[in-house]
Image: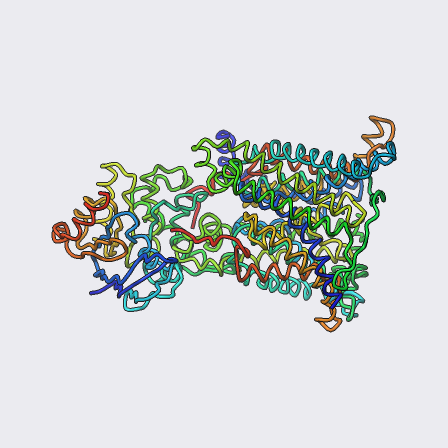
Amino acid sequence: MSIISKGIEKIRSNKRILFIGYVLLGIALVSLPFLLSNTVGRTWVRILDFALIYAMLALGLNIVVGFAGLLDLGYIAFYAVGAYAWALLASPQFGLHLPFWAILPIGAGVAAIFGILLGAPTLRLRGDYLAIVTLGFGEIIRIFLNNLDHPVNVTNGPIGINKIDPIVIAGADLTRTHEILGIQFSGAHIYYYVLVLLLMITVLICVRLENSRLGRAWIAVREDELAAQAMGINTRNVKLLAFALGATFGGVAGGLFASLQGFVSPESFVLLESIMVLCMVVLGGMGHIFGVLLGALLLTTLPEILRSTASPIQESLFGAVYIDPEALRMLLFGLALILVMLVRPTGLWPGTTRKQLGNKG
Amino acid sequence: MKLLELKSVGKKFGGVQALSDVNLTVQLGEIYGLIGPNGAGKTTLFNLLTGVYSPDIGEINFDRASLVGLKPHQVASKGIARTFQNIRLFQEMSVLENVMVGCHARTKVGALGAVLKTRASKDEEANIYRQSMAWLAYVGIESEASSLSKNLSYGDQRRLEVARALATQPKLLALDEPAAGMNATETEELKALIKKIRADGVSVLLIEHDVKLIMSLCDRLAVLDYGEKIAEGEPDAVRGDPAVIKAYLGGNLP
Amino acid sequence: MDIFFQQVINGLVLGSVYALVALGYTMVYGILGLINFAHGEVVMVGAMVALATVAYLFGYFPELNPIVMVLIAATTSVISCMVLSYFIERLAYRPLRKAPRLAPLITAIGISILLQNLAMIIWGRQYKTVPKIFSFETREFLGANITDLQIFIIVLSAILMTLLLLIVNYSKLGRAMRATSESQRIAGLLGVNINKIISFTFVIGAGLGAVAGILVAANYSVAHYSMGFMLGLKAFTAAVLGGIGNLGGAVLGGLLLGLIESIGAGYIGDITGGFLGSHYQDVFAFLVLIIVLVFRPTGIMGERISERA
């Protein structure tokens, strides 16, 4: 272990190797969709898009759960708020068609307000009491979305909202196929680049927050609330800020989801989704940004891999499909969750000893 | 000059009168001790002072302003820093980061500044780092800066708690049984550290079980018994006070 | 007025079931500080096993006395759930007792997903209807209808809950349980076999859960592989409402939640002038929970936790 970490330290200190590393990472990120669509198929680029959106969502929840230590089981509500904000402002539902650069901040802002609305009355609750209240809040939001089709039709109820506008840049609809320099780029492919860019910004924001006065205050509150207060930290404000910022990320991710999918319905925002995002955070390595990224990518792609292998493997082994592949894949998924936590209780990639001395300021 | 003044402070928990009619004053630049048998109300008084509880009656004035009704974080920014009887460090943070958290009260960069890495935020962060390293050096554990705080030895954890409290730049440092569990050498080192802190202009309020330590260190002290102050004054005067002897011989010697 | 009594009766029936399930959550939470997310699925397994047993007996031994049939099915179901819960604790929770707090929560979620899908594979996606082996009389009571089955549910739940309270408060085992929930370390030092007590807690909770599952299936005449999730969630809500870790609180919270839901569903339209319909039944339940917790942060009967410095 120490040899590896020394090796990493060496690479970090060598600017040239670091630069080459970044270039290689860049090339890998740019070429990944080409690789996927030419090997395992085009649908995988789309799966990757959703994985990136979930990664953004998981990073937002990581601020709340990982940094500030507030167990939030209703996080998907903010995702829902962001998605419906986009859907209502850019679809035939109300005939509004605002441009994406206007909706994105509106969605983020509305989600942040919901975060504060949830946080303000509940922050003095401890641990699991907070968990159940956030869970209830998530359900309340979903039930409203599901039923606000009467007496006034706002959300179209369980049917959901259709024909949502995609992101349009310079007159180009990003969900359509475009030809650039003789290469065909599918909509999913273009969205992939947009999402990679946004995810990188998200990661940067998270890293900077973590290594700031505010980030330290969050972690202090998580570790020992009373001691944190004794250090002059206004724990209520700091927690509220965690809720609001986490919600903002969720709102942005929700908007992107709505625009990519072109359709939203309450079904996408059930409790299981909140739980999934929480699993990404904990399984990846709570509080560790890159661990959380890993968790999100794994938990979004694993069920898809299982989906595409559950039937073929049965056929090759037994000559027929005996077990419902959908049930089988979720069964294996549940099993994977249990096994990973048993083998690595602190997550797959927990933060190693926190930042080293000497490169500050 | 008066730094801290308690006027007829009382606190009840259910039917138990934990403190009644306690008056005491800590002068600027003083090391003030607070002793008493178990359950005498020392920790309750400490918690009233630091905003964990609010007194039922009475006044608490600090630096010419009332502390009654303030939250712990407000008390900290008024200039009272504390340590805890059973050490409460931020375990999963490094030693350095623990002290950096202590700088919270005297700094102000928020979320936006951190994300945009503005000039002001970079300067402040560099400043926090420099100050925190200086505080670690002050208590003598700068070589441990990058270790996780939970991995420190017991004595060093106590020192870290003091460094973290000092980083809030207090006028009064309140120490809750800092010598508990220390051996003779560690206690001597602690004594030297407390004297140094006072010499650098910070007043000290000390709760201790170790009567010898209190007597040799404090300028003045008060004795609590059953929630009431039974004596106050200089160590020699208190030592001979009949009420104190009765309280200690009647109860258990600490 | 008869609508009101009808809703009170429905609420009591629903609440009794919630209370039985909530006890399972609250006992485990009291001892381990763990939200046993898989408990709802154990309840579902209880209903499914009982149903499968009845269906089997009905098919192969149709001349058997229905009461014997139900007794055999209930016993099978309770024992299966106890065994299942015992192994869940052994395999998924015990190895993580010293792990970070959220690790066992994730394994609990894993178990929940696992059990739900296992049930779907074994019993299929469709709703299972309960065979009609009994016909229940419907009685009139203060202008409301109540069936013998509903009376049975309320009475049986009350008996089981009393029994549990007696065990916990007056038996040696119960004393060991209470000691363990105060402090595992000290109870261990005093010679309490902690592992045995924790296993026992899970087993008892599972037994009550199995009974609750059977009662729900009987009351609605159907069972489904996904029935445990919402039921578990509501029961957990009830446990928190009453003050989690407190047995009396779980009973009170369960009954209260059942009453709030059914009375709320009956009147929510009138209260809001028709703006909100009975679809908002769950909103009502969660809203009450949030309001209660805002004013009493540790639930109705929860201990006041004062932060000690």
Left or right? Give the position of A24 relative to A221. Answer: right
Q: Nearer the viewer, residue B137 or C198?
A: C198
Please state the horizontal and vertical placement of residue A111, each as a whole percent of the image: 63, 62
Farthest-out residue, bottom: C273
- The residue located at (76%, 54%) in the rendering is A267
Q: How many marks?
A: 0
Q: Nearer the viewer, residue C233 or C170?
A: C170
Residue occupying image coordinates x 72% and y 39%: C46
Task: Using residue A287 as the reference point, say whether residue C51 is left or right of it.
Answer: right
C85, A111: nearer the viewer: C85
Is residue A168 visible in the rendered structure shown here? no
Q: Position of residue C301 (x, y in %)?
A: 53, 54
Residue A143, x across and y down, in percent: 72, 60
Residue B209 image-quadrant placement: top left
User: Would residue A306 be found to the left or right of residue C32 on screen?
Assistant: right
Q: In the displayed structure, does residue B146 sit left or right of residue A134?
A: left
